[in-house]
Amino acid sequence: MTRPCRAGALGRVSESNSKLWLRKSFACPSARTIWVLLLLAVVLSPSAAHAYAGPGAGFAVLSSFWAIFVAFLYSFYALMTWPFRQLFRFLRRRNAYGKATFERAVILGFDGMDPELAERFMSEGRLPNLSKLRDKGTFSKLRTTFPAISPVAWSTFLTGVNPGKHNIYDFLACDRNHYLPYLSSAEIRGPKRHIKIGKYSIPFGKTEIKAMRKGTPFWHWLGKAGIFSSVIRVPVTFPPEKFQGVLLSGMCVPDLKGSQGTFCLCTTRAAGDKFREGGVRAPVERKNGVCHSYVPGPDSPIAEAAGQELRVAYEIKPDVAAQTARLTVGSEKFTLKVGEYSEWIPIEFKAGMGFNAHGICRFYLKEVSPEVEVYVTPVNIDPGHPDLPISHPVTYSIYLAKLYGAFATLGLAEDTWALNEHVLDDDAFLMQAYGNHEDREKMLFDALDKTRQGLCTCVFDTTDRIQHMFWRYLEEDHPAARDVPKAERREVIQDLYQRMDKLIGRVMEKIDDDTLLMVISDHGFKSFARCMNLNAWLHQNGYLALKDGKTESGDWFEDVDWSRTRAYTMGLNGLYLNLKGREKQGTVDPSEAEALKEEIKQKLDGLVDPSSGTVGITGVFVTENVYRGPYAENAPDILVGYGAGYRASWDSVMGKVTTQIFEDNMKAWSGDHCIDPRLVPGVLFSSHKFVTAKPAIVDVAPTILKLFGIALPSHFDGKPWDLAPRALTTKTPAVTPAT
Amino acid sequence: MPSLALFLASWLTSPLAIVIALSVVIGLLMIVLFGYTSDQKAIAIAKDQLKAHLLAVRLYRDQLHVVMGSYGKVLRGTGRYLKLAFKPLLYVIIPITLMIVWLDRSLGLTAIQANTPFLLTARVNNADALDNISIDLPPGITASAPPVHVAADNEVVWRLVASQDGAYDVKIKTATGAEGVNKTVRVTSQLAQLSPERLRDHFWERMFSSGESALPANSVVESIAVNYPERNIPLGVAGYEMNWIWLFFILSMIAGFIFKELLGIEV
């Protein structure tokens, strides 16, 4: 699948008459002769007065010379200082690669790649390159973290420690004072001081971005030893930290609104219900055949009252006969067919007083008749003009944007919510997901080309998002696909794995004997057919109380009576006690906490879904037995491990109490991994054989450090794997890609 | 107030004001034309790629293969960028060259001033013709010195003076009774279209430096030149003066830069 508009039709779609006239007159042979003669005359009769051909050409010539001059200066500086820098490094650290087993390590992360599916597709002959890695190197399940959630597992991958030491337990963490969630990975705070001028409140100072993830990524240790790293889209690397190398942040980078992705549906249809998740609706107003709508942006940083949303208006001129529309967004004009995406369009939100926010978004034309509907992706931070740092150095995202054009920067860039809410259909979602994927492939190959020594690692989210959204087609009777005839169910996930296999093949073409290739995933995948509302269970079992007369709560515990509540849950797997001295309205005495946890554990473990008789919960884990480290106290008290086919319900995640405990999952989001971690291990493939019994994701960081000959920090929880003796002694040739 | 109006009127017709106005108008026109005739998307991409390769040199400065590779890409990218800029150049170079030539006749030279001596030089195609050459001066112009024959160059030089402003036709005769050939001499303190030389043959030279018709092909006179002094435009700052073409270059570039930003045209 390719993006139809990636390289094309922005800018001017039709040429003006004058331009055509010029082109035609130049194309006509007789006219061409005259032009050539005239040009020759001008060129062959030089004098001072004739050397200048207007400001356009003047700029072209001047900037060309400037570019060459600057490049020469940079290169000259780099060349002249290179020996001294090398000498300095040598004196400080001796030879950085002196003890390294490999010159380079390439780690490809495929979020959510499942070992059972990989094995099945390999046995069907669909994955020749992964099969080669399995046959010549390593293929194993990779134990994941508790819980098996991407930000948790990838944080463990990059720090080599358990969550008690890196402080990430879910996408969301719980504010115990307000029983409300906040983003677990980073906290963005506007300037503290403001100066009031008239109706404006001018912020004074810098926006603060505080990393909530603790621990040190292993590429810092590599950098300290003089080993360069290219790190692309590894989750929970926002805000980016300094080290010797380049890094583009991945999962957890917010959109320009500060959310994890807010799409917009612009429509002439009357306002319906608000989207349950992830999106907003903007009206499209028709006037004389021209439609007007807007892209919602962040809140104004200078408005005195909070919540004054900035907007960028745009125009839609539908052509019903051609099933197209011409969109004008600021200075950008482009034509879209129904079912087509635009390129990334730069958007500037102007707050006044010189305060602007720069973003990019894509427009997708859904319909031009009888109604007009345009889907707008979440407004991503513009990588070429980042208002927040999304890379290290800051220029790295600018470099990538200049080299390949604008790209998705949002952490969760594939708009799963829009597919869930039927704003996008399967094709539109896949088009978007693979469009982003292609951009990341380009970045990976650029990094491979630039990083011939050191570490090169890139994480692809596509595997996770597509499995989440299309698992329904893998199963005969998934509730979310019961209405879809079998003939219309596509082999989306098989195709996904084959695409990834081809990518691995292309990477194998780029590596040599001195490169270690590892393919890993943070967790596997299982069906998500049944939802369980754990808050409803807590309510029905007397642990959570609602205000008198209420049988259900609103989102985020609206109508929960905290004075009578002993336990609650928010997020995907965490269960919290309402502990005195910790929660604002705590009721459970710390001395009773252990007993209460044990009581809940006993009741929940092995809980059966009455409608099918299947075990819905296969493991309940008291976190003090699982986590060790200085941040363990921030963890939920209990982790709930759902059985295969089950997961926390959408309502339960959002702190809502319903009357039903179990129900079918009817959403396109039909596969998941936020279950019992023992059921969803990730994968480990490698080009060289490792000797290890039960590899875990926490072992990757120490393994890489050991392979580069670097002493392991004492706080690491992971254990390095050993290479098989043959690989160590003979350096088995790197696997070649399957043809 | 009347004196201010007079000052403004005289300033607005001064060469400086004219060059400023021309630079702004031409800067705008050329930028718009560049925008229309160039592949804006391709230029934007070419420029972005250049910047990317420059950034690569900084990002990967410890990796020599990247530094050298990026430098090579900068050179190639510059070539691609210039190629893209060449197409609009084809459209603008002829009109702007012709316009500059035309303007140079007014703004590049100063007309002869009344009561100020000037030289008129006639060149013939053989030294023998020098013996019979003579000049017919119109009323208002007088010779202030006898003619000087420069046999080595086949030239005769007259030192003349005009008593008042006007356009005078000076006739050069190469034989008694012959009809002779004319050369216009402009005497004024205002801006005027000037032709410093009248030529026989030399088509391209006539195109670019002469504003008059060619001398007859059978004439022994090859050229008649008037030594109009070059004009330097006072900038009104610390006595600085500048040739109009440099001033035009700088001002039109500034105007072009402003308009390209305002109009969003990629250059």
Image: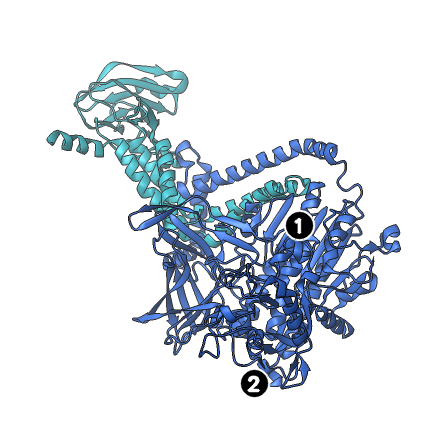
Chain colours: A blue, B cyan
Q: Is residue B144 left or right of residue A449?
A: left
Q: Is residue A124 left or right of residue A610?
A: right
Q: Residues within 10 Å of mark 1 (few under 14, many from 20)?
A: some
Q: Nearer the viewer, mark 2 or mark 1?
A: 1
Work out whether residue A361 can be spotted. yes
Horizontal and vertical percent position of residue B216: 32, 33
Viewer-closest of B113 and A29:
B113
Q: Residues within 10 Å of mark 2 (few under 14, many from 20)?
A: few
Q: Secondary structure at mark 1?
A: loop
Numbered circle sitting on residue A68: none
Q: Is residue A364 above or below residue A405?
A: below
> Label 1 belongs to which residue?
A217
Instruction: Work out whether mark 2 precedes mark 1 in sequence or the reverse, and give the earlier one.
Output: 1
- How far apart, in angstroms, are the residues tagged by discs 2 and 1? 46 Å
Residue extending furthest top? B145
Specify the quadrant of the image occupied by residue B131: top left
Q: Secondary structure at mark 2?
A: loop
Horizontal and vertical percent position of residue A476: 65, 84
Viewer-closest of B90 and A10:
A10
Q: Residue at x 75, y 60 (%)?
A: A696
Disc 2 residue type?
Asp
Instruction: Tell me which chain the residue with mark 1 is part of.
Output: A
Disc 1 residue type?
Pro
Q: Is residue B98 above or below residue A145?
A: above
Viewer-closest of A470 and A133:
A470
Quarter of the rendering occupied by the N terminus of chain B: top left
> Label 2 belongs to which residue?
A483
Horizontal and vertical percent position of residue B158: 28, 18
Residue extending furthest left? B2
Instruction: Tell me which chain the residue with mark 2 is part of.
Output: A
Horizontal and vertical percent position of residue A474: 66, 78
